[in-house]
Amino acid sequence: MTIPLTTERPSRAELAPGRLPVGIIGLGIAVPDQVVTNHDWEEALDTSDEWIRTRTGIVERRRIAEDDATSDLAIRAGEAALAEAGVDVDDLGAIIVATTTPDYICPQTAPIVAAGLETNVAAFDVGAACSGFIYGLSVAASTVVAYDPRPILLIGAEAMTRLMDDQDRSTAVLFGDGAGACVLAAESGGGTLGPFEMGSDGDLADALIIPAGGSRNPASQETVAERQHYLTMSGSEIYKHAVTRMTSSARSVLDRAGMDIDDIDLVVGHQANARILNAVADRLGVDEDRAFIDVDRYGNTSAASIPLALVDAREQGLLPAGATVLLTAFGAGLTWASCLVTFSDGDPEVTP
C-alpha cells in the first residue's frame, strides 16, 4: 500500500477528549501451523470437547513449533504489518513487543525482534499480560504525539503453550500461541486512538501466576520438581474480576469520549473465554452482531489475541473504512485496559 505524506494533521484540540491523531495503518499476524483440537486433549486429559466448548467456547488452538520462540512469531507478524503499511523498518521510531512469554528472562524480546527485522531502532517490551496490547497502544500513541512522529511497530506475541502444565485440565486446554502486529503513525485520514482507561490490582497477583522463576522465588530443583514454573489460575476469581473490570473500563472510555455504545461499530475484547466476552457484551448492551468472538479458533493467546481478532474481523468485513472499535482486555497482574480505535476513512495520510 502506498502511503501519501502530508504536512497537515488535526490538532488535539480538534479531536474529542482523549482522542489522539494516531492511526493503525497496517496489520499482520503469524500463527503456528500445528492445530490442537479439543479432541486431541480428550486423549491426554480427563476432559471432552463438549466440556471445553460449553465452558470456554474454544474449539481449537495453535501450538508453536519446537524450534520456534516468541520472537520468531513476532518477527513474522511484524513483517506482515510493515508490508501492509508500506513502511520500511528503518523509518520506524520504535518496536514494542507485548508478551508474557519472552524468549528469555533477560534480555527482553523486542531487541531480538528488531535484530530479526534487521534494524537497530529502539526496542523494548511491555509486560501487562493479556492487557499488554492495549497498554502498548497507549505507549506508542503517546510517543508519536509527544515527541517522535515516526511510525511505531507494536507486536503482541505469545508462546503460551510453553508455560502450560499438560497435566492441568484447568489451564492446558485454554491457551494457544500466535502473534499479531500493527503499525501506528501520526496521520490525518481520520484514524485516531483513545481515550485509554487502564488499571491494576496487585493484591490479586496470585489469581493468575507462574509461581517460580523470578526474583521472589528463583528456579531450583525443588521448584522444578513441584511444577512451579507453569501457569496457575483461580478461574472463578479471574472470571468475576474480568467481567467487572472490562465492563467498567469500557464504560469509562465511552464516557470520556462523549459516546454511547450505539456509536461503536464493533467491540473486540481480549479473547480469553466466550463466557466472559458474552457477559461483558451483555452488561454493555452490545448486540451479538457487534461483539466479536474468535476464541474458538485460537484459544487464549494473551497479548496476541486482540490483533489476531482485528485481522479476523477485517477479513469478515466487519472493519470498514472509518469504523470505530472498542477494545477491552483483562489479564494477570491483575491488569485491565480499554480504548477506542477509529480507522482511517480511506488510504491513511502519514505525517512525516
Image (cartoon, rainbow, N blue to C red):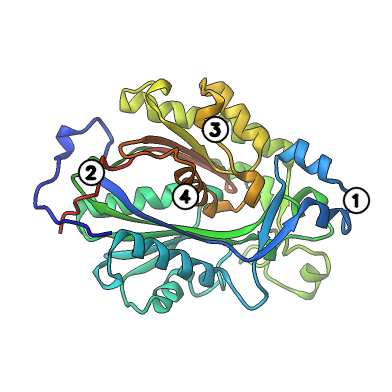
Task: Reply above or below: 115 against 47.
Answer: below
Task: Kindly indicate whether the residue at mark 2 contacts the one at mark 4 (C-beta within 8 angstroms).
Answer: no
Mark linked to residue 311: 4
Quick one: label 4, few (<14), some, or many (20+) residues within 10 Å?
Answer: some
Quick one: label 1, few (<14), some, or many (20+) residues within 10 Å?
Answer: few
Determine which residue is flagged by label 3.
245
Q: CA distance from mark 4 to mark 3?
A: 25 Å
| Secondary-structure class at tag 4 | helix
Q: Earlier in the sequence, mark 4 or mark 1?
A: 1
Q: Earlier in the sequence, mark 2 or mark 3?
A: 2
Looking at the image, which is closer to me, 285 or 255?
285
Residue 178 percent coordinates (x, y):
57, 60
Q: CA distance from mark 2 to mark 3?
A: 27 Å
Q: CA distance from mark 4 to mark 2?
A: 22 Å
Mark linked to residue 46: 1
Q: Give, as a three-letter code, the residue at label 1.
A: Asp
Answer left or right for 34 relative to 29: right
